[in-house]
Amino acid sequence: MLRETIKDEVVDPVITDIWRASEVGELCEAYLCHVRLGNQPAKMPGRIRHLLDDGGLHEKDIVNRLKQGGFDTLYTGDDQLYVHCVDGDVRINGHPDGLLRNIPEDLRRLDWADERFSWDSVYYLLEITAPNTFAYQRYSQEHLRGVNWRKFVQTHLYLGSEELRDKAHCAVVVVKNKMTSALYEEGLTYDKSIVDTTVEKLKRVEELVARNEVSSMRCSDWHKDNCKFRHLCFAENEVEDRTLPTHGFLDADKLLEAQQLREALDAYVQGKEYESLAKELNEESRRYFGEIIDQYDAEGIFVNQRKVKWTNSSWSGIDTETLKLKYPDIYEEVHIVKPTHFISVGRGKGD
Ligand code: SF4
């Protein structure tokens, strides 16, 4: 019903000499050449359009929560600023998600901030992102820089912009797990070298574009099957056949969700490792508690106000093998088979 209304979208390229801050963190220079040349991207699948639109909803949600939480939140939503990040041979503009002003002292808590971050400013750039749960889990270890380089560059471009450079030298990035609504908050300080490296890269791109050329850079990872310019970089026989079976096994590498599926598998494997480690730790602790309780000939022990004791119990059940052997009629009468439906994950390749 509703799904039928979500159509693939043909995105018409816009030829302009002004770069969008949200795009220039892209590492592939061929991609940037295609953007700058105004080359036609592949159709955007309806599901991806839907997903991107939902990103806007999460941004609004965070802004609303900040306002309700008493934060002085400026230039958000329809009131967003239009900032000039770099001017000169290379021009980059963009719309920051907002500004925070006078953050109350008792609310100045972040999950992580870089070494130069400080709370001595009146204004803080606000940037919001809402990744899936698997990318979200990486934030506490890898931070914005490691998980979302494009957004990291974009944040630095805004901090260095003509409009904000004298007001805010630090940013607060709010990351919302779009599946669980959990929040991760990070503090970033302006680093000019990030902007300089980006401008150098764009100059190389501009030189190629002036000659109507595209960088010879070619990806060899999952981008090859998912990038919107893949049809311009690779011949048809070099790109994976994206026709998907409607029955049988899918190949994750051919799906638009390839990256998320890989992250989901990593999270699963890690969860399994934790599970067996947790089992071992529990067993080890139980064994030790038992030894100490026996050593003191006690019934149990209180540790941090938790009661630890031996518990006697017995297991009762039916020996189905004996029942089947001796009383097959009764076995047939009580034996039931219930269908179950669950996801199992193989242990190795091809399992
Ligand atoms: S398909 Fe690969 S090489 Fe071509 S623009 Fe995309 S990321 Fe770059």
Image: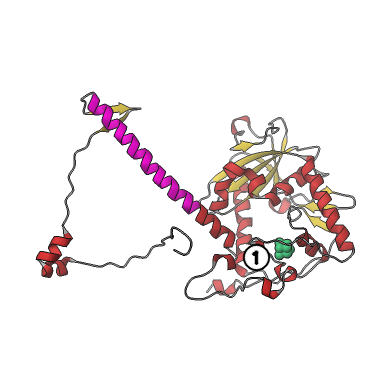
Q: Is residue 218 left or right of residue 69?
A: right
Q: Dot 1 corresponds to which residue?
A: 226
Q: Residue furthest top?
A: 296
Q: Is residue 29 above or below residue 292?
A: below
User: Which residue range is magenta in the image?
Assistant: 267-295
Q: Is residue 137 above or below residue 32?
A: above
Q: Residue 265, percent across and down?
A: 50, 56
Q: Residue at x 76, y 39 (%)?
A: 191
Q: Residue 67, percent across and down?
A: 62, 43
Report if residue 317 is visible in the image. Answer: yes
Report if residue 68 is visible in the image. Answer: no
Q: Residue at x 58, y 65 (%)?
A: 253
Quadrant containing the C terminus is bottom left
Q: Amino acid at mark 1?
A: Asn
Considering the whole magenta stretch, tell me its main secondary structure.
helix
Q: Is residue 293 magenta?
A: yes
Q: Is residue 114 left or right of residue 339?
A: right
Q: Residue 54, percent across and down?
A: 60, 59
